[in-house]
Structure formats: structure tokens, C-alpha cells
Image (spheres, coloured by chain):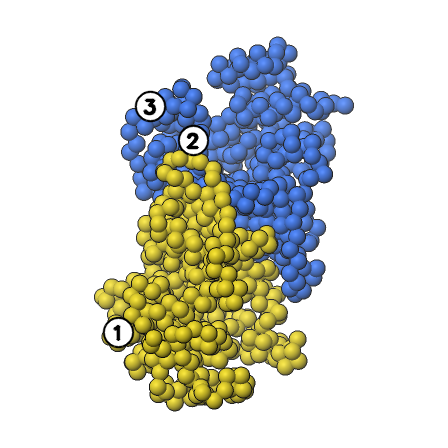
Chain colours: A blue, B yellow
Amino acid sequence: MSKVKIGVFGVRRGSVVMKYCQTQPDAQLVAICDKWEQGLTDKKKELGEDIAYYTSFDDFINHDMDAVVLANYANEHAPYAMRCMEKGLHVLSEVLPCQTMAEAVQLVETTEKTGKVYAYAENYCFMAAPYEMRKLYRSGKLGEFEYGEGEYIHNCESIWPRITRGEKHHWRNNMYATFYCTHSIGPLIHITGLRPVSVTGFELPFNARMERMGAKSGSAGMEIITMENGGIIKSVHGGCSKNSIWFCIYGTLGRAESSREDAQYGAYSRIFTNLDRYEGECFDRPDTYCPEADEPSIVRKWGHGGSDYHVMHNFVDRILGNTEADTIDIYEALDMFLPGMFAYRSVLAGGIPMSIPNLRIVSERDKWRNDTWCTDPAVAKDQLVPSYSKGNPDIPDETYQRIYEKWINGV
Amino acid sequence: MSKVKIGIFGVRRGSSVVKYCRTQPDVQLVAICDKWEQGLMDKKKELGEDIAYYTSFDDFIKHDMDAVVLANYANEHAPYAIRCMERGLHVLSEVLPCQTMAEAVQLVETVEKTGKVYAYAENYCFMAAPYEMRKLYRSGKLGEFEYGEGEYMHNCESIWPIITRGEKHHWRNNIYATFYCTHSIGPLIHITGLRPVSVTGFELPFNARMERMGAKSGNTGMEIITMENGGIIKSLHGLGPSKNSIWFCIYGTLGRAESSREDAQYGGHGRIFTNLDRYEGECFNRPATYCPGADEPSIVQKWGHGGSDYHVMHNFVDRILGNTDADTIDIYEALDMFLPGMFAYRSVLAGGIPMDIPNLRIASERDKWRNDTWCTDPAVAKEQLVPSYSKGNPDIPDETYQRIYEEWINGV
């Protein structure tokens, strides 16, 4: 069997990739790149000399390989994705796909021009419950999509020192409330295959928790997304006080949803269904099961309920020629992400609905080709917007110093 | 002990009130009014001659009584509430409080002028889980309100014949998608005591189910409400979704509390899940669950809607008897629960832009709305009639209503 030669950019999130390559027969890890030298050195001790280790992306990209997994900073995937594809390499991009519309246009055009595989690693689509919801929906058992919800709420206060290291301008401290949206939106897009056409955004206030963390935005974001068939998705994500990963979908034939966090009853590994057999039956038929209970090896060994495995496997499978492999292409990735971007444009415009661009349509691309609107001063040029709609709060340096010290001291 | 003499307007929904009056020592049911003569006759057979039975409200209102429970049509409570209070009667109004801003202004002014008790019967506030959430919130255990959700999804297709009788212009076939909103919004208002300041509305499409029912609006409505402290409420409700849900969830700075999901079959609104920090920033995972009314089995088991029907009546009577701490919902709070739904539809009609929610506590705001008869009821709207569906009222053939009428008659 062919082995796909894989390079990983970003040693931390790249650990999952490494695990895949070490345990599966169809992929081989050949190179790792990270500017963080200590992390590379530690990984070399763990994995040995058969893999090449780079701190320079320019050198890494020249390594003999077939595909790259981009696990670098969440707002910086696009430039590297394009460089890889132009070099003839397939790309698996971690979340999020890009941070500007200009990058989105370039990503679409580069993918079309090079013909390489671009896959988006929104692993929440492959958690047991949402993946089962997809099977039910695509088999017609839910009927036509009416309404759906996705939640990714994660109180990150306790892990903030480790993941931001007290860096005032870390992307996590710089992103707006609706940016990190594809965990909550993605599964509903992947379940239904419907296009989002408009979005209204909402931003919860910057609060004491965000201030303690040094995060300069609203504490959570919400997107209310209208789909092409008139159905609606509610997506809520961010840093409310308690965690939630949860999905729910109503179709004309009934409802399916995962289990609530505090119910402690399987969370996103458990599905509840209530399905009519025909429209208008109105029969109460609640049922529940854990969809991948018959695949215990996948669920127990892999992170995020087995979803990390599926993302890698499908990517490699598609590279090896299986056109049915369940990957998320660039168009679908933008269907998952653009509602979050345009939700913030909605917030900044006073909460009015925004149409979501469809870059499948070639003529729409020129409109956005030079749009560098974002919160990253390195990229935005004259289109920089604040991370918080009421203006970036003033957070004293002492806050970041405290967080840096917590990281150093391993708190 | 004084007995409060109660009259009921609307014999069907009034049944839970009848039950209260027959079993509790502080009230006496003295009169029932309904234009539906057969219903009255049936009730007379059940309750006997000690009670007076009226088909005319003009006669009913003159009966010797202290208070009236308005359980007539959901969009027609306000005119009767005003007449009752002007007559010196206290009022318990079923949902919804009014259908126009003009009525809202009149209600507020009549309550203030007459000094009578006006209580709003949003019983969902008193279901076990949301009522416990209120106790937790008011004791500070949830911290400051951040985000909350309320849902009242009720696929009414199977009961539509019995509750609309095939009447094309029944209020249920005439309401817009965000009208019937206080079951989902009310508990979160009653938990937090916060004022809603703006709302953006969303309307799910008029679909095949609504067409079969003869209901002329979107199948479900959603209000995204911004509260006075910047927190946000999502309210989702409808009579045309595929499956039912009564569910509430609240996030505060100290943690989360929520009821149990319908399909989990684990107590519904009778069960609460909590996850509470002991101090801000603790970030400690502490999930717990219990059924809050479990030590009051007699109330929960005997009364509808998880015991909430009892609490609404009891608190109303209690307040009439002089207890100023009785947990009733006054007219201001009732409007805080209802106006987001009204203004959500104005938002929809305006293309989905946010709408400010009036605060009629402020006397100077009332004049702006005094003559606003915007609604979907042609008998009341005058020149401010709006369609029940934002894309224009669908054409539903008479055969649909005939079929539903026959389903009602044949007891399907």
C-alpha cells in the first residue's frame, strides 16, 4: 500500500497527527516544523532521528513529502496553505481556514488552480453524535432541515497561561467573539450540506473573566444563520462560565441531539432521537444510543471522541484516490467559517443581518479580493477592526505578566 | 379566614382554576362566564347550582365577586382586564397580556389608577426547574447573568382540530410566529428580574405542517433579546415544529443551571442540573442534579404543568389577601415578558434589524404608543393591520378548514 508522506507544521496540535502516522499503515510522518525550538527538541527525543526537524518553514516545505498538516496559529493557516499547494503539496488545515476575505479568495483560487487536496480539519463534525445525525439526515430520516443548534462553550481561564503564555498580542487574546466559530457551526453544515446565506451576530460583553485572562473581546459570540432553505441555525461559542459541546437538529420528521454536558450521560458520544416515520405522524418516539459503541477501539484511543482519527483517515484516503472520502473541502470550510466573520461585521454594524459570500461563484470573488478586514494588525493594513465592538479594553501589562508567571510556574 | 370570591371568564382553560377554588380554603368560585353555552351547561352539571353561569360578560362582571380570572382568547385579555379593574375587581390574566401597544399603555394606566391587583399567569415561571433557578440566582449562587435560553416548542398538529375547530380566523391561525412568547421568555425574566432592552426577531418558514393546520404564519419564532446588563436571552417557541421542548438554561458568572431535555426522558422541567463555582474564577467542574419539588409531592402530582398552576393561583389570592411579598407577576413584568415577542416580529418585518423594547414604567414613553394598534387582528388593528406571515399571508383553501372542522366533530 502507498504511504502518504506527511509533514506537520506546529508541533503541539501536531501530536495527534503523529499518533495517526505511528499507528496507521497508510501514512508516514517525515518532517516536523515549529519555531519553538524547545518543543522540537523534546519531540525529537520522543520520536527519534527518522524524522526531520525544522524551525524554518522555507526549509521544511522543501522536504520530500506529499502533504502537510497545518497546525500552526489558528488565524495564520491560509498563507501557508497556499504556499504548500503551490509547491504541489496536499493540505489538511486546522481551524480556522483564514482570517480575511482576501485570503479566502486566494485559497479558493489556489485550490482550483493546483488541483491539490485541501481538507479542513473541523473534527467536531466527526464526533459520534453529530456524525450519526449526518447519517440520519442524509438517509432522509429527519426530513427537511428546519432548525439546528451548535454549541462550543469552553471556559479557558484555567488553561490560558499555558496556551497564551502571557502574550498580550497572542491570537487568542486578539480574536473577536465570533471568530472561533467552526466547532459550533461546522457539524450542522456537514450534517445538512446546506449553504448559509445570511447571518446576524451577537457579542456577549467583555467581562471580569476576560479581563483576568487578558482576552480583549466579548466573552462569547452567537451567530443566527439563515440557510438557503429558510431554516435557521443558532451557533453559540466562547467563554461562558461552564463548558458545552452540544448539537441539535430539527427536521420535518423529528429531532436528533447530543447529550448535555451536565447530564453526565455521554455528551457528544450519545444521541437522542425522536423521529416520525412519515410527515404528520406526530408520534412521540424518543430513543437514545451511543453511535460508535461498536467501534470501541476508535473511540477509546483517539481524542475528541474519535473524531481526530476520522479527520486524518479521510484526508489520507482522499489523497490515495478515494473521491468518496468524507473530507471538508475549501467551499464547505468557508460555509462553516464565514458566518462567524460576517457575524462580527453584523455586530459592528449595529446588529443588522449580513449576506454571506459564496465564493463558488467566480464573479463574487473580485468583490472580496482586496478585503483585508480583520483584527490582526500584521495583515489588516488599513482595514483593522478592534477585537471588541465597544473598543479594545485597556488591560494592564501586569495582567499579562501574572499569566506569564503562572505558565512558567506550571500553575 | 377571608375567602376571595372569584369569577372565571373562559370555561375551558379555567378548569385548573376551578380545581383550585374547590380544594383551597382561601377562595370561593362564584361565577363562570363563556359564550360557549354547551361548555357552560356541562360545567353546571359538574359543579352545581351554587355558582352562577353567564354567557354575557356584561352580566357576569356585575356579579358579587372580588377577582376575575381571564381565561378567554389569548389575544383578547386586555379589554376585559381593563373593564374588570375599572369595576374594582382584581385580575389574573392568562397569557398573553395584550395584543397592541395601545392596550399595553391602557393596561398600565388602569392598574396604576385603580390600584387593583393585576397578576399575569405565566405559569412556566413556577415549574420546578425554572423556579429553583430563580432561587439559585436570587441567592447569588449563579453570579451575574451572562446568557440564558428558554424554549416552548409544541407541535400542535394533532390537537389543532380541538383547539381551533376549523375556524379560519381563529386567533391561533392568525398570530404571527413570535407572538406566543411568554412561556419561553417569561421564566428567564422572572429568574433574573432584568429588563429586556432590545430584540432581534427570526421567523422560520411557513411550511407544509402549518399549511395542513391552516395556521397562517411561520412555524416557529425566535427572539434574541439583549438585557439591560448586556446579557443575552435566546427564546425559541412555536406551534409548528416537529417535536416538543420545554427547556430553560441560564449561565451566570458563577456557573450554569438548566432543566432536563425532553427526549432525555429524565424529568423534563421537573429536574434541574447545576454546575456552580463557589467563587468567581474557581473554574471547578461540579455537576449536580435533583428534582426541586420532590419534597412537595402533593403539589407536583395533583396539579397541571408540574404544579405551576397551583402556584399561580395561590400567589394571586395571597396578594389579594394582603401579602405584598406574594410572588405574582405584575403588569410591568408581564410586558417585559411579552413585548420582546411583539417587537421581534416588528424586527422581522423590518428585515431583521434590532428593535428597542419600550419601558412603560416611564410615563413619558406611554404617549408614543398610546395610539399604536399594530397587530394581526383586523377587529382591532384599524389601519395598522400587519400580515401573520412576513412574506404575506398564505392562501389556504377553505377545504383545509373544513377538514379540520370535521376532524374535530368526529373526535379524531
Residue at image coords 26%, 76%? B114
The three-letter code of the residue at mark 1 reads Gly
SS type, badge 3: helix
The three-letter code of the residue at mark 3 reads Gln
SS type, badge 2: helix
Q: Is residue A272 left or right of residue B330?
A: right
Q: Position of residue A100 (x, y in %)?
A: 46, 36
Select label 3 or label 1 by which is in front: 1
Mark 3 to mark 2 CA distance (whole Å):
16 Å
Select label 3 or label 2 by which is in front: 2
Residue wearing tag 2: A158
Quadrant of the frame with the N terminus of chain B:
bottom left
The three-letter code of the residue at mark 2 reads Ser
Q: Mark 3 Cα within 10 Å, few/some/many (few <14, many 20+)?
A: some
Counting residues from the start of the chain, the first of labels 3 and 2 encountered is: 2
Per the rendering, the mark at residue B115 is: 1
Mark 3 to mark 1 CA distance (whole Å):
59 Å
Residues at discs 3 and 1 both on one chain: no
Q: Nearer the viewer, residue B176 or B53?
A: B53
